[in-house]
Image (cartoon, coloured by chain):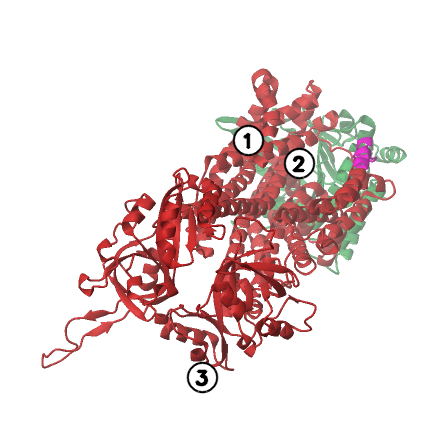
Amino acid sequence: MLSMVAAVVLAVALPFVVFDVARRPTIRRLALRNVVRRPGEAAIVVGGSLLATALITASFIIGDSFGSSIRGVAADWLGSTDELVVVPDPAMLDETTERLAALSPDLVDGVLAVSMFEVAVRVTPLEVAGTTGSASGGDAAPAPIDTGLVSADVRLVELDPAQAVAFANDPEAVSTLDTTNAGSRQADRGPASVVMSQDLADEIGAAPGGSIDILIANTPTTLVVAAVDATTSFAAFGDLIVSNGTVSDHLDDAAAVGSSAVLVSNTGDVFSGADLTEQTTTAIRSTLGPQALIEPLKLDLLDNAEDEAAEMRELFGTVGGFSVAAGILLMVNLFMMLAGERRSEMGMLRATGLRRGHLVRAYALEGAVYGVLAAAAGVLVGIGVAAAVMKLAGGLIETSVPISIDVQTSSLLSGALIGLMVSQVTVLLTSWRVTRLNIVRAIRELPEPPSTRRSQRQMVLGAIGIVAGALAYLALGTNPIVAMTAPVLFLVSLIPFIERLLPRRAAIVVTCGPALIWVAAVFGLLPEVMDDPDIFLFLLQGVLLVGLATTILSVLDRFWLSGVARIGGGGIARRLGLAEPLARPVRSALLVAMYALVIFTVTFIAVLDSVFQAQAPDFAIQAGGAYDLYVDVNATSGINADDLGQRDDVVSATALSRGVVLGRLGDDDDRTNLPHWAIAGVDKTFLAAAPPALTGRLNRFNSDTEAWQALTSSGEALAIVDGDTGLNPGETYQFRASTGEFTTFTVAGTTAQMWLVNTSALVNEGSAESLFGDGRPPTRFFLDLADGADPDTVATELNTTEAEAGLEARTFLDAAKSATDEQQGFLILLQAYLGAGLLIGIAGLGVVLVRAVHERRRQFGVMRALGIAAPVIRRAFLVEALFVTLQGVALGVSLGLLSSWQVLTRSSAFEDNLGFRVPVTVLVLLAAGCALASLALATIPAVRASRTSPAAALRIT
Amino acid sequence: MARGQDRVQTDDMLRSRSRTRQKAAPRPEADPQPSAPVPASTSLVSVQGVVKTYRSGDVAVEALRGVDLEIEAGEFVVIMGPSGNGKTTLLNCCSGIDDIDAGTVIVDGLELHRLTDRARTAHRATRMGFVFQSFNLIPVLNAAENCELPLLAAGVDLRTARERAGELLERVGLADRARHRPAELSGGEQQRVAVARSLVANPAVVWADEPTGNLDSATAENVLDLFREVNASGQTLVVVTHDPTIGAIADRIVTVADGRITADRRQHHNHNQSQSEGRSERPC
């Protein structure tokens, strides 16, 4: 959308530029002469402009990269598979496969039957031939070497390799599997082969040619690793791929411990086949019946990739927007400085007959040259920034998706167009401003006198703003953006009118002050309107807060600074250093705002990071109640709650049966792709320890305990759901049983953070049995440990001793920390991305100071002539730099804290009122870092200013 | 009041007020290497054999070609001559703003170009005042702050500097404009502030380069009145100018042409008559 806007704007503006180049030699000469003869200036403007293009381009590339990384998973892990059809009865697998194979070749070009099992796996202990020190030379018992690494709960897939190769249309896929062992129990044939995923191989230390033991239903099976493959066409379904019968033939009741499915490949390639998902799903339901459980894996993944790409693009684009805004302020500042130096020249040009419009067009042409150069360079820098972010993301964000960079031409073009538009619009608006001058005063380099009366135009604009702001709020006040900005427009538009009654400073304070308070407090004042805010809203809030606060600060600087000067005495360096920013409020305000914008965002994110880090213990209690850890086992492990409860360090153990069912809102919910729900069944033993607290419950329950008791013991079809599901107490929801019938449940209560343990809803054990089907043993246990027992130690011990039973124990705290660590990694990534914007602020100050040496050369010469020593001038420069920096940092930090406090504690933007924490260490380091960087950058211009030769400087006329 | 007495009184005022928090003006550092003895001279400013050459690439321009000049304390000396013949260069070299290639410049007993840059700067702060054609007030400081600057540079405390600046501004008739920045002052007012600034540190000599060059005749006359007044109180003035009206009131006219002094003519005036004329035309 923004690219389209940029293209339109440039399509309107650039023809004028081209016309001037071709047909207006005066304008062309004026513009291009400045570019050629002032290469230093040109480099500075291009440098300042390219950063905006770089960040915009980088945000597009980052979005594309996340999206294509997920799309890559579609190709690598799913391969040809577009849909997965669950076959509840394994005995029906062959028949189902035949029926699906008969579907129209216009829709389906392949089907493949698979069986899946949850197993534990380890590298087969090695037997070392030879003695262990028998002096007599007799035979010694071999000493087995056990790697000790067992991976529990691994998915194993059985399939027909020949059919799989045909299905995947990939001769490499699983072709290394030995089909002759399929279905064989004969030991003399030797171990069967297996294709293993790279991740699992790394985890247990397996390698091609080595052997592994598969443990399922207490039955070990040894397999030879035929290949370790980072990506296979079936990687999404399991880490181990074997021929049919390799495992199932060794099981007494394979149907009880495994599951069956048919993979369906739509006609078309890996990506285009997903377009046929809807038709194929309809055809499958026509063939198998409306109750067929179909998962559109490919379409879901590709949709997820698109959503993720768009989300990342928006997130990084919005966060980067602060830096882009800072870059725009830098461009305005630079341009105004350069225009100030050329003021005399502009006056002479006007005196010789050029109109104001001619000057603007000359600047536009000059700006276009800078813009094109900046866009080209910015795109290249943007690629570098994106590459750095993606590399950092790979290290910070724990994900099974391999993250890699994807640079698309469309993104580069979009970034260049938007960057060019930003610079061109900035140049045009700034040049319109700077070319408004009095010819004589400009020629004589006399300053423009301050305007003493409000122009009629300002009054008209103010009136329009007042009316527009009021009407917008009344008509569209429920829109969050309008609700935030309309009152600001109204108040700021009052300035020209209030200036008739009060001095300008007072008029600005009495209008911008309330506007600032409104923007800062709007999340708390209008919680319903600001519910579920878009990330763009935070960007808008930040820009408005910084703009309003900087405006107020710039008109009040004189008052509080004079106080500072009095407190410290009249040090000449400090007086000179502070005098310059005071005397140039617009330029100082732009510099301060530049810093403050980026610091605001960094502070906001640092607060979020600090808050989220502290949430882990709370999350753990919200997910597990008084229980300390949860244990997941294979269905065939035979482990039960009594076994676990007998441990000395366990006070109570309760069993939960688990399964995945489809859910719908009601009988009239006719969606073809119903959502999947991870359900757990509990009985009254679940209340042996305090269960998780409820965030809401049915009115008829007077306490959480009543609600839990009703769930576990009443026999009613009740469910306690995770708050993220969007259901509220009292609402009804339907879950589909294994028979295909839907059962209506009433929401008895809601909890928080149940998602941490991959559970969406809890029902009673009886309801779970009817949903999952009889005979499903519990596969999860919650353990309440004795006082003094360390949950981590117990979990580690269980994982070590019971791994072969496919047991995985984990503390609720560990699960919570993993979740917050992932969030934290992402926040760190955003902060690093913002670092680029901070560079803009610091570099911008350096550039302005470098230009200031040239701009104020005569002034420095006079100071030296009057007897002001060189060190004094150096210190004055450093004071000036430090003043701007610290003002910007203080403003950004205070506004960032205020905004984040408001959002976290006074609004519904973040659920469950996460609390507020100030990351003191981070903010102190930030302030110190900025101050030191500014001082470092200001040192060279300070030295150059102090070395100004008075005679040479005074010769300048 | 006799010439010189006013200056002595001002000196006493300055010393007494800075006694409580005195930051001594840095003593100009002498050349660490032993130098030839400074020739004895009673002149306030003694210039001997000064040569100044400007080089730009292969081009060398001799701006001064062996200039000798002696200026006594309390003199009002005007340096005149065609444009581009070395007048401003001479002034810059005499005041220590610019370096010389040969010769000696002694001001108030110190050979300027043997001093370090730091010492020379400090010497300017304490013993010299400057008035420029383009006023050259610091635009970000108001009139009072511009006047205080030389005293602060000399290490005088803020309170004393502020009081002294106030006195000078009142003396030039701008006490009510003390808080205005240069952009808010007329050309004449700016130049009067510059004159006040040049006098605030009670300098040994005030150097003025085309002080009326950017002023209309009426305003120029006001500035001339100031010059007459300060000179009458004993202030040494050296003015580079094209303006003949300044030459008419000076004690001495030195003509510079082609980098040399081609004429040095003394004039005699009735200072009392001049003073009364000046008061009647005091600027409003």
Q: Nearer the viewer, residue A405 or B11?
A: A405
Q: Which residue is mark 2?
A: B70
User: Are labels 3 and 2 on one chain?
Assistant: no
Residue placed at 83% from the left, 28% from the top? B218
Q: Is residue A453 magenta?
A: yes
User: Are labels 1 and 2 on one chain?
Assistant: no
Give, as a three-letter code, the residue at label 1.
Tyr
Q: Which residue is mark 3?
A: A648
Give, as a three-letter code, the residue at label 2.
Glu
- Callout 1 environment at 10 Å: few (<14), some (14 to 19), or many (20+)? many
User: Is residue A554 placed above or below A658 in the rendered structure?
Assistant: above
Q: Tag 3's secondary structure?
A: loop
Quarter holding the N terminus of chain A? top right
Q: Is residue B256 visible?
A: no
How far is mark 1 from mark 2, CA to CA?
57 Å
Cβ atoms at labels 3 and 2 below 8 Å apart = no
How far is mark 1 from mark 3, CA to CA?
75 Å
Position in image of residue B81 (x %, y %): 67, 24
| Magenta stretch, main secondary structure class | helix
- Colour seen for chain A: red
Residue at the right extreme of this rendering: B280
- Callout 2 environment at 10 Å: few (<14), some (14 to 19), or many (20+)? some
Dot 1: chain letter: A
Residue A224 is drawn in which quadrant? bottom left
Q: Is residue A548 left or right of residue A656?
A: right
Position in image of residue A674 (x %, y %): 53, 52
Residue A761 is drawn in which quadrant? bottom right
Residue A318 is drawn in which quadrant? top right
- Total marks in image: 3
